[in-house]
Image (cartoon, rainbow, N blue to C red):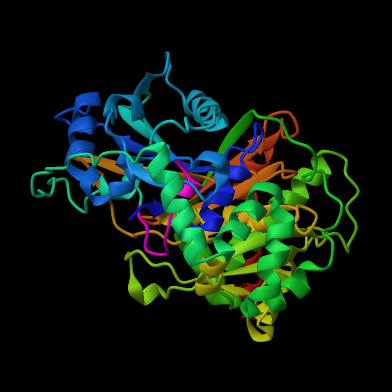
Amino acid sequence: MVDRLSPLDASFLYFEGPVTPMHVGGVAVFDLPAAGFDYETLADLIEARISLVPRYRQKIRWVPGHLANPVWVDDGSFDLSYHLRRSALPRPGSDAQLRELVARVQSRALDRRRPLWEMYLVEGLSDERIAIITKTHHAMVDGISAVDIAQVILDVSPVVRELPPDDWTARPEPTAAGLVLDAVTEIARRPSALVDTVRLGLADARSTAENVTRTVGGLLSAARAAARPAPGSPLNLAIGPQRRFAVARTDLADYRRIREKSGGTVNDVLLATIAGAIRGWLLSRGEPVTPASVVRAMVPVSVRSEAEGGRLGNRVSSYLVDLPVGEPNPVVRLSQVTYAMQAHKESGQSVGAATIVALSGFAPPTLHAMGARVASSFSSRVFNLIVTNVPGPQFPLFASGARMLEMFPVVPLPGGQALAIGSTSYNGGIYYGLNADREAMYDVDVIASLIEESLAELVDASRASVNRRD
């Protein structure tokens, strides 16, 4: 029996275009261990772990005549050296050079003739560091418990865990005639399959989302929230194929201190921080900002409790949140965000993880692709930007003895969206990755620096409000 892509997984192949590559990515920075870490070290590690993610040795075969959705087949010519690549930064090996490399790597679409993933070992980074860049197509992520290659190469200690030998042998690919026969048999057994396939081949993302919304009861409240058009913003315009990438580094302890003093959640503090940064960016551009100005964010939220620690979890709800960029007072801004998030939870205007799966059949590498997948299902007129926040492990992780220092997500841009902000908490820090259209967001570094300033402003304002009460 063939392993066929689900209709919504297949949609990410149909919806992909020259300016909207549909892959999620990331960049992790590591300390170079005393024993060294080179291309062969990483290749050996992947060879030993790739059996944990069988999809990474499979490619897509299209059915002749598009009679059915594509199928996954083993790549009999699988070549790890094609997917695992080696780059070196010229001196001085600065973080700015690394960010430029990340932007260029993430701008390029994946080769559909091969398994849909790539990984880059980046050497020459200053201060005895290395980096690993990853990119994985959305169609690869096929379930709420899915993991990706970047997860399985990490260990909780410098000692590399051993796995049983991998005796994988590629299964023969089906012939074109076999694919057609399977498709015809499936259509005879389930006539609606042909209708689904034709619709996905012809309809755009919005009409598909509307069809799903009409049939999935759990999305009704979210659809009502999405009926209001997003406010006008320089974040929404036609985008090109090239990207810029910026990062911000913050301390998780700051978010927790603010939360303890003001109530709400760490995620509320993060959204208020981003609201302050976007406000400052708009003002730096001379954009009109009034007390009523808002920027609407699509926000997938992990609802895993902190008691679950660093374990991976996939319980997620997604909200459309109006960030109060017109509010100059950071404490008031935070209270408005907290109120808005609480109102969403109480009104049921959210999309739960199970419903998201029904909508798009996915679970992303460390959840960041949830934001991109949900965003791709709604009209770009509904929101101004995507913000993902994924709680990660609060202890160090290692790859063949190399300690991971930082991890920055790269969330893809849907059409008409010039900026996507991803954040990941890891080992006491919250790390932001800002993926942006190269032409429209020439000043994305300004937003990154303003994120750090906005958080500091919240810390100071929260401390001052406590002192006044005392």
Nearer-the-camera pick, 398 or 183 = 183
Q: Is 143 colored magenta in this rendering?
A: yes
Residue 48 appearing in the image: yes
**Residue toward you, 357 or 312:** 357
**Looking at this view, is 136 or 265 the one in front?**
136
* Residue 244 or residue 269, whichever sits in front: 244
Is residue 330 shown left or right of residue 88?
right
Identified at 75% across, 44% down, the residue is: 416
Q: Is residue 203 above or below residue 92?
A: below
- Using the rendered image of the protein, determine whether residue 468 is visible from the camera's viewpoint: no
Name the quarter where the C terminus is drawn. Answer: bottom right
Image location of residue 269, percent across then percent down: 60, 65
Residue 405 position in % (x across, y down): 35, 43
Residue range of the region highlighted in magenta in the rendering? 136-147
Please state the horizontal and vertical placement of residue 251, each as a whole percent of the image. 47, 55
In the shown orientation, is residue 319 left or right of residue 309?
right
